[in-house]
């Protein structure tokens, strides 16, 4: 065994150059030497898995958008029923049921979308917030127009 004059690695006598740095026993560098990549520097053959919190946070903004869309559809159907048949019709309980479904969905969608938009700048979260805000503006306009 001989110590490499460059890096100090112990080399077996059967070898002419250091396996780690390519330096010969006399201190010269081997011309055709290519270092093997170390385990820490070797590129991984498989991609790193996404952390669980990233998977959940990507799901949250999609859920927020679905809730906002569901709220938009439910409240829009309720408003269409209300506009077509009025407050004092047989369709009024259906209108109330749609509103009772739509607004909790919109509140949860608004909160989840805002969280995704603020924490990660998620465009889907921003879209969910925008849908909910438009829904509230439309609802306020409807209430104000019915009160006159």
Image: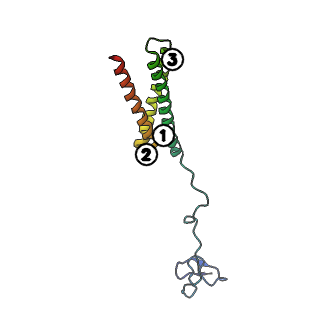
Q: Position of residue 28 (x, y in %)?
A: 54, 87
As displayed, is residue 124 above or below residue 80? below
The reply to whether callout 3 and callout 2 are in contact (CB within 8 Å) is no
- Distance between the alpha carbons at the discs numbered 1 and 2: 10 Å
Q: Secondary structure at mark 3?
A: helix
Q: Position of residue 44 (x, y in %)?
A: 59, 61
Residue farthest right in this picture: 14
Looking at the rendering, in which quadrant would you find the N terminus?
bottom right
In terms of depth relative to the viewer, which is nearer, 111 or 141? 141
As displayed, is residue 82 above or below residue 111? above
Residue farthest left in this picture: 148
State the residue position of label 3: 94
Which quarter of the figure has residue 106?
top left
The reply to whether callout 1 and callout 2 are in contact (CB within 8 Å) is yes
In terms of depth relative to the viewer, which is nearer, 143 or 114? 143
Q: Earlier in the sequence, mark 3 or mark 2?
A: 3
Is 139 left, or right, of 56 in this rendering? left
Q: Position of residue 104 (x, y in %)?
A: 46, 26
In terms of depth relative to the viewer, which is nearer, 113 or 85? 85
Which quarter of the figure has residue 115?
top left
In the image, which disc is placed on residue 61? Answer: 1
In terms of depth relative to the viewer, which is nearer, 131 or 43? 131
Q: Position of residue 141 (x, y in %)?
A: 36, 25
Q: Earlier in the sequence, mark 1 or mark 2?
A: 1
Foreground mark, 1 or 3, reads 3
In the image, which disc is placed on residue 120? Answer: 2
Q: Earlier in the sequence, mark 1 or mark 3?
A: 1
- Distance between the alpha carbons at the discs numbered 1 and 3: 29 Å
Q: Residue at x 48, y 29 (%)?
A: 71
Q: Residue at x 51, y 46 (%)?
A: 54
Q: Residue at x 48, y 36 (%)?
A: 64
């Amino acid at each position: 065994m001989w110590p490499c004059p460059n890096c100090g690695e112990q080399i077996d006598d059967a070898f002419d150059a250091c396996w780690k740095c390519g330096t010969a026993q006399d201190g010269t560098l081997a011309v055709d030497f290519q270092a093997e990549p170390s385990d820490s520097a070797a590129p991984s053959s498989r991609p790193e898995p996404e952390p669980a919190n990233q998977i959940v946070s990507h799901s949250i903004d999609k859920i927020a958008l679905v809730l906002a869309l569901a709220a938009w559809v439910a409240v829009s159907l309720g408003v269409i029923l209300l506009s077509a048949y009025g407050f004092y019709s047989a369709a009024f309980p259906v209108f109330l049921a749609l509103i009772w479904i739509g607004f909790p969905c919109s509140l949860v969608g608004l909160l989840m979308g805002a969280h995704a938009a603020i924490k990660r700048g998620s465009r889907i979260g921003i879209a969910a917030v925008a849908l909910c805000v438009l829904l509230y503006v439309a609802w306020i306009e409807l209430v104000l127009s019915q009160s006159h």
